[in-house]
Structures are given as C-alpha cells and as structure tokens.
Image: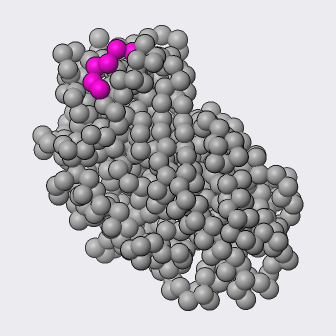
Amino acid sequence: MPEFDYIIVGGGTSGCVTAWNLVTKHDARVLLLEAGPNDWHPLLRFPSGFIKFLNGSRFLKFYKSVPQKQLFGRVQVVPQGNVLGGGSSVNAQVYQRGRAADWDAWRDYAGNDLWSWETILPHFTRLEANAKFNNEFHGVDGPQKVGDINYISEMSHLYVRAVQELGLPFNPDFNDGNPRGVGFMQVTATRGRRWSTVDGFIRSIIKDKRLTVVTGATATRILLENGRATGIEYLRKGETHRVTAANEVILTAGTFVTPKLLMLSGIGPTDELKRHGIATVVDTPGVGANLQDHHEAPIMAQTKRHLGYYGQDSGFNMLKNGLEYVLTHRGRASSSGTEACSYLVPDDETGDPVIKLYCVPTTAYKDPDVTGVPDVDGFVLNACLLRPSSRGSVRLASADPLADPVIDNNFLGTERDLRYQVAGLRAAREVLATSHLAREVVREIFPGPGVTSDEALAEHARRTVKTNYHPVGTCRMGGESDPMAVVTPELKVRGVEGLRIFDMSVVPQLMSGNTNAPAMAIADRACQLMMAKG
C-alpha cells in the first residue's frame, strides 16, 4: 500500500489549509483526499457564480434532514461543498470570525488555555492578506486574500443607512472580536474574483512532489490496528484503494461526513453501531451529537424601483453582466449578493446581539417549499439566529459508506430559539419602517402586514426557517471530564492513537458569524498543536 506521512480526508477549507501547512512548514509527505471533483468550472471564479449551483450541481452535496415535527414536517435541505476547496469554492465568500467571547468560551470546554480569542487571533492574521486593514486584528502577508466587496448594490447602501437611522453605529470592521452595529462585509475575493482555499493554499504547491491530491475519492473507513489509525480505505471510480499514514490520519470531511466516517469505522455510540451491525472499537457517545447551525427566517418587501439584483441572472441582463465581468471583473457579477449586515436587537442575557440581520438585494432566491410569494422586484431581510440553543444530530442510515447520513437539524427546537427568531423578525420590520426604506417600499409581500401576533410570526418562522449553511459541532472538543467530547483540546480522537479531526465538527459552540474563516484558523492552530506533539 502507498504510504504517506499524513493522510487528510476532505479537501475543503480545513483540508487545504492543513495540507499547505504540513507540506510547506514541516516538509511532510501528504495525501489529500477529496470526494468531489476538481474546481475547474469558470463559474467557481465568479463571486456570484455559486448562485447558479444552488438549484443543483455536482459541486454541492444536497443533504436532507429527517422531517421536522416542530416545522410542520418540513424537510430541511443543507447544501455543502462537494469540490476541491469545499465551502470556500461555492460559498458567498463572507469573511467573519465571530466574537472574542465565542472563542473564549472554548477555554471552558477545553479546561485549559489552548483555545481562546488570544490564541486563535494570530492564526487569523497569519493566514490573511487583507487589502484594506493592516493592524493588530489583520494580516497582509498571508496566502488567503481578503478584501471589500467589488460591487455593492444601491439596496445594500440603503439598508445600511436605514439601520443607522435606528441608532446603530456604522462598523467598518466586523472582525475585531466585537461585531456590532451595521456595515458591509469583507469577502475572500481579490480584484472581483473568488479566492478559495485552493487558490490560497493548494495551487502554489500542486506540483510539489510532497503533495498528492486525489479527487473523486470517497473515504469508506479508517484503517485501525491495535488501537491506532494506520490509514484510509477509499473508493474511486468503482475501485477500492488502501493507503497508510506513517504519522497521523486527519479528518477534515466536515460536520456531516466526519462523524459518519468515525461510526463506519467503529468509533461512536455503541447502540448506534450495533443497530447497523458495526463492531464497536471505541464507545464514544458524542459522535454525531451536538449538531448546531445558523438558521434564518425572512421578511420580504417589494420596491418601487430597481435597487438590487432581481432579474439580473437571466436573459439579456445575465449576458450583459457576464460580459462586463469577463472584460473588467467588475459590475453585478463581481458581488456575491451578500453585502451588508447588522448585529441588531435583541440582546441575550449577556447583552450581546443574538440576531444577525442581513439584506439580500433580491426576492428571487428562496427555498422550494416557500410558496405564495409574489414574483416582484424587491429585497429580503433575513433574521439569522447566531447562537441557537437547539441541538441536532447526525446518525448512520446504514453500514453502506455511500449512503447519506441521517440528519436531524432540530431548528427552533427550543422555546428560546423560537422566541429570539420572532424577535429577529420584529427587528427586521423596524428596519423596514425607517424613512430610508419606507419611501422605497411598495409593501411587505411576505409574510405580509397582517401577520402581527407572536403566534402568527412564530408560525411564519416555523414554515420558512432554513439553514444559513454553517453546520458545526458533531465531534466536539472537550476536556477529560466531558463524557460527550469526541476529541481532546489538541483535537485527538479519544481512544485512538494517530487520529485527529481538524474541521468544524470539533466546534463545541457555534460562533457568531460565518464559518469559513474560523475553519481556516482552526486548522492552522490544530497543525501547530500537533507539530508541538500535543
């Protein structure tokens, strides 16, 4: 069997950073396995291109939840990257880190000082090449390019002014550890072009003999021998392959696939493994538990004039915008459409915002099960719950490694989450009522001005809530006394030597922001801890 120093399972954000780190900093022989294809498609370079993939694409894996009783039996669809670069190749490119307090909470889970805002910030700055900021919170020399959005719609500018009208200050930088106020988001793009983790971390070393990248490779189980991970079995083009690792096997397959792979390999809750005829190697009850995700519910409004992107992705407009982008890397196609947000009311018990309200400058993009919405020009205010208290799970459907896992998102599974989601919708309406927006709006079209009571808004939330594409937590990190911890603070899988997890499944508590930037920093920090022989 071919042998490497390290085998990395999953070529997404975390996997790309890990491979780059081990090859360039530690002279290691690395195999990077990715289930999806290479990132060859031209639309993967367009900041707006990912929108075309949301209705179906080989570059996304469309996971489905079990029917959600609290959501009137709705099945949640959660797209995840299925391409080299993972989410960084197909996301809206938003670069956010969350609050310092989010990271400081890790100290409590770990029971030591290995994880905190103070320890993670140097990894954010080390990896970053920010085109705008050069200060204690930002780096300028790293491989990951970050900058302002190339094109911002008039609608997003109006939204920012409307929120300021309510008294919130303009915030030029949401990444200083205290994201408050309203402003425009920074993105992982440069000169109007997406800059994925493949661009930042893999292309420069793709011809390096120390790195082997294999796409179209679906890991089927971890090879274990005498309590140690020795390699990976994977399927490619119908053939089974086995490869071995001299040092470590590192899982970066993501929040849904990493726990699935552990359970297929006999690492997980004994009852769950027994149900599928899998022999238990290590009884780890926390595998697949603690699933968290940002979720959102909408307020939609019709506008008197064209302010955003409605109708810009079809027909002549699509051709015009595409040509402008190809020739200049500017114009509407150089925006991902997610441009402005605010950390608005309500506050939680600690006085921190629990809702991120962001403006989508079109009414065109909505879930298939959201019906009855007029097809008119306008915009959406999405109220996104930042730190949900609900917890879901990931379980096996069968012992077949090609079967999708059984996912229970459990959105709005607690009264607290439903209460805050309703409060977020009310906050959106406050923004809608400001003079800056009121003079531009014809009417609220969804759910409509007649939906006013807490009960009616709660029903609207349950009928429309959907993922914000940030699942985390199914192999959470924790200290020795935590029975549900899957990995140690050094991100070693408990009970198995030579096996670590460097992806977002290790996150104990969801951070207050998008997850692509945290995935990079976590992987970089994890490499540091591993190479220090932690």
Image quarter of residue 134: bottom left
The residue at the point 55 percent across, 46 percent down is 410
From what the image shows, is residue 447 above or below residue 347? above
Q: How is the image coloured?
A: one colour
Please identify the residue farthest to the left as the structure is shown.
Answer: 533
Residue toward you, 130 or 379 = 379
Predominant secondary structure, magenta span: loop
Is 455 on the left or on the right of 197, as rendered?
A: right
The quarter of the image holding the C terminus is top left
What segment is highlighted magenta in the picture?
278-283
x and y, in percent, of residue 77 in the image: 64, 41
Is 229 on the left or on the right of 273, as rendered?
A: left
The quarter of the image holding the N terminus is top left
Q: Is residue 337 magenta?
A: no
Q: Is residue 443 visible?
A: yes
Q: Is residue 122 visible?
A: no
x and y, in percent, of residue 145 in the image: 42, 59
The residue at the point 63 percent across, 48 percent down is 70
The residue at the point 84 percent across, 75 percent down is 443
Is 161 on the left or on the right of 264, as rendered?
A: right
The residue at the point 41 percent across, 44 percent down is 290
x and y, in percent, of residue 430 in the image: 67, 80
Residue toward you, 65 or 43 = 65
Is 281 on the left or on the right of 236, as rendered?
A: left
x and y, in percent, of residue 227 in the image: 20, 20
Residue toward you, 322 or 72 = 72
Image quarter of residue 490: top left
Image quarter of residue 2: top left
Q: Is residue 280 magenta?
A: yes
Number of numbered labels in the structure image:
0
